[in-house]
Amino acid sequence: MDIPSKYNALSVENKWYDYWMEHKYFHSTPDDREPYTIVIPPPNVTGILHMGHMLNNTIQDVLIRRARLLGKNACWVPGTDHASIATEAKVVAKLKAQGIDKNDLTREEFLEHAWEWTEEYGGVILEQLKKLGCSCDWDRTKFTMDDDMSEAVIKVFVDLYSKGLIYRGYRMVNWDPEAKTTLSDEEVIHVEKQGLLYYLEYKVEGSDEKLTIATTRPETIFGDTAICINPNDERFTHLKGKKAIVPICGRVIPIIEDEYVDVEFGTGCLKVTPAHDENDKVLGDKHQLEVIDIFNEDASLNSFGMHYEGQDRFVVRKAITKELEEAGILVKTENHINKVGTSERTKAVIEPRLSDQWFLKMEDLAKPAIDAVLKTGDVKLFPKKFENTYRHWMENIRDWNISRQLLWGQQIPAYFYGDGKEDFVVAETIEAALKLAQEKTNNSALKVEDLKQDTDALDTWFSSWLWPMSVFDGIRNPENEEIKYYYPTNDLVTGPDILFFWVARMIVAGYEYRDEKPFENVYLTGLVRDKQRRKMSKSLGNSPDALKLIEDYSADGVRVGLLLSSAAGNDLMFDEALCQQGKGLGNKIWSAFYLTNLWDVEDIEQPQSSKIALEWFESKFQKVLLEIEDHFSKYRLSDAIMAIYKLINDDFASWLLEIVKPAYQQPIDSKTYNAVMAIFEDILKVAHPFMPFITEEIWQTITERTPEEALIVSKWPEAKPINETLISEFEFASEVISGVRNIRKQKNIAFKDAIGFSVVNNENVNTTFDAVISKLGNLESFEYVTEAVEGALTYRVKSNEYFIPMEGSIDIEAEIEKLTEELKYTEGFLKSVQKKLSNERFVAGAPEQVVASEKKKEADALAKIETIKASLASLK
């Protein structure tokens, strides 16, 4: 067999991926095997492969490939998410570059552009995943805006509305002025920012008195509709029933009393702006205050902002501060740290805004999902520490704002037939809506043209929360063969940052629509960070090009590199050196294979050293196999690949192959060779989930295989008995061999020169591995003695003493000269250390650890001098 000495990853990876695809190894259909199912966390259709995707999808591929080897019917469903906000923003930007304003387009025209963009760029990330080796069932690829997926979403909306769980309400919401849409509470990130507290004076109507109000947002004074004081605050008792005048706009507003006001904060007087603060809205409702919305949808001021109309809120803040200061209304400012809500998607500062929106009642829906994770354990989180986060979110859950002011997404199936807020019906189709509207109004003359569908789209998460069911058509056809076979799925691999956004909501949906968990285990990966612990991002420029990494280090190398330092739930400090380490493991496997390929095989007698080494390795392999399986059961994939790494690098390549390797230009016996190749095949099987390409290449090169015999569909190694005594005895023997090699190295004894060897066996070690010690130490004799051998080089392993006769082994004159020179140097070094220690000023003034370090140097030097003198004495 003629194989190259160096492994060429680029050609191999393309070849085998095409082969796997051609033979449909990734494709799954229901049969009588046990199913093993994973649904991919659908990446944004706008996305390209980054380090987080690399880690997440490598883990999924490891799990799915191992499931195949275990004989399960492995199904990994890929797909993408339509990502309403992100995709619409990209389409809008593209249109803008072409001189087209989104607002000039009809919904249908805009959606044409969105679909065009999606078809052009939408499949990029899935194609990139193939380069990583991901064995998804590509025939099952889904997109959250596919017709069948959208039908499922609309069906669920209608169902929840009919159950009274979805309602329309005029509520304070989180408004993203950049995306021009509402966001759910969970999509708002609260960031601590240094700001200012502005102290403004409001005149009390009909008097010369002034009230000082502290605010962080002076631009909102145009929306003030009251001043609130605490009824228990004696400073302001005289103001009860009076009115104040808002600066600049001159509006007269009531002074109201409420215990909500914190007497200690600011000045004890609170300006109330019901349209732009959630707490102010509560106060406004309670005291029946006027509500004045001063912002446009892009957070510029509207006509209520008077001469600031059309200007951005932050521009106005600077300008109005100057105006208030010049008018003597701004008394002072103070530094103030404030938690500012920002959009998770656009990073824009959120504007609280009153709006008619659609909400889903979550309290009762959440209960089965809380029990599944925290009580029954039907759904397990790995690592377990995330249960506390889950508990906090789920037990404090709020109604979910599911409507978005976007065009890209499933359009809300509500149809208005009149001008009133309640003049609407909810139905899956406009035809069904017409029928409902006719019944509701008792007006059979109503026509389709009279109905106007709500222009809002549904929150993207409202489609992806159905993902484990909708990918198998379990919402539209709940009794179909596939949903009953593949659901619930087995493992979900995702990041902790979407534990609530997605994971918790999928559990909620699973219990609502199938009365069953959507998955058994949730493996939460950490975030990928750089060596400075910074999160990787384009803006920081610290995220490497994923495809370039694959090109430089191979897909197998990158996969191993990522997993070597990726314990579940812990952030991964990414360093390209890890990928180099992964590539190095691939090279080690290839070199081992290349070595075995050089051997001539003959039917000759098997050496005892090979026989016992193979018995040892079989037990060692089985022990590591148990460790690997234990790691898999606990989702410790980093530990699993490390165990495989050591098995290949240390036990197989550094020990077994060295023991069985035939002498130069000598053949290997067929019995040993066949056993080594069977072991190699088992190693390839356990390494395959982590390193699919190189393992398949070697597997197919060892011997000609049919498609049914490919490594990807072979069988995981079977468990066999383990001989712990043999493993323990080999560990001892390996230390003996290392001792021989060290002496050879220190004394420049060439390996080709055989040496004598004696042992005082104080440990009563069995002679099991003597043949191995003899071969790897190139010993011409091996005898057991009862006392020390005079004039011999010696070392210990535990209490056993080993002796190598010097005569004939080393050049005695050269050794005496070398030791004499070493003694002279060490004595000089000792003298300099002792001189320093005899200096009283040094000992008294130097730090304690410095003095201790010098004393240790003295002790080490004295011990070394004693050893050198003893060695010299034995040579003379």
Image (spheres, helix red, strand yellow):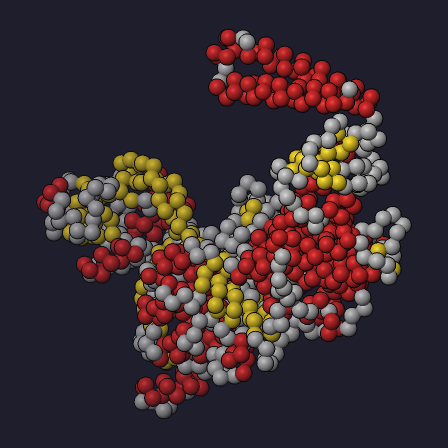
Residue at coordinates 27% horizontally, 55% vertically from top-left? 279
Residue 609 location in percent, x, y?
76, 51
Residue 181 sits in which quadrant? bottom left
Residue 40 location in percent, x, y?
56, 66
Residue 590 location in percent, x, y?
76, 54
Relative horizontal placement of residue 511, taking residue 690 as reference (left or right): left
Residue that extends furthest to the right in the rendered view of this protein:
665
Residue at coordinates 79% horizontally, 37% vertically from top-left? 756
49 or 739: nearer the eye?
A: 739
Q: Quadrant of the N terminus?
A: bottom right
Residue 704 sits in which quadrant? bottom right
Relative horizontal placement of residue 439, taking residue 739 as reference (left or right): left
389 or 445: nearer the eye?
A: 389
Residue 487 location in percent, x, y?
50, 75
Residue that extends furthest to the left in the rendered view of this protein:
238
Residue at coordinates 65% horizontally, 57% vertically from top-left? 619
Residue at coordinates 42% horizontally, 68% vertically from top-left? 378
Relative horizontal placement of residue 765, taking residue 8 as reference (left or right): left
For the question of whether residue 424 can be seen, the reply is no
710 or 277: nearer the eye?
A: 710
Residue that extends furthest to the bottom in the rendered view of this protein:
444
For the question of whether residue 163 can be seen, the reply is yes
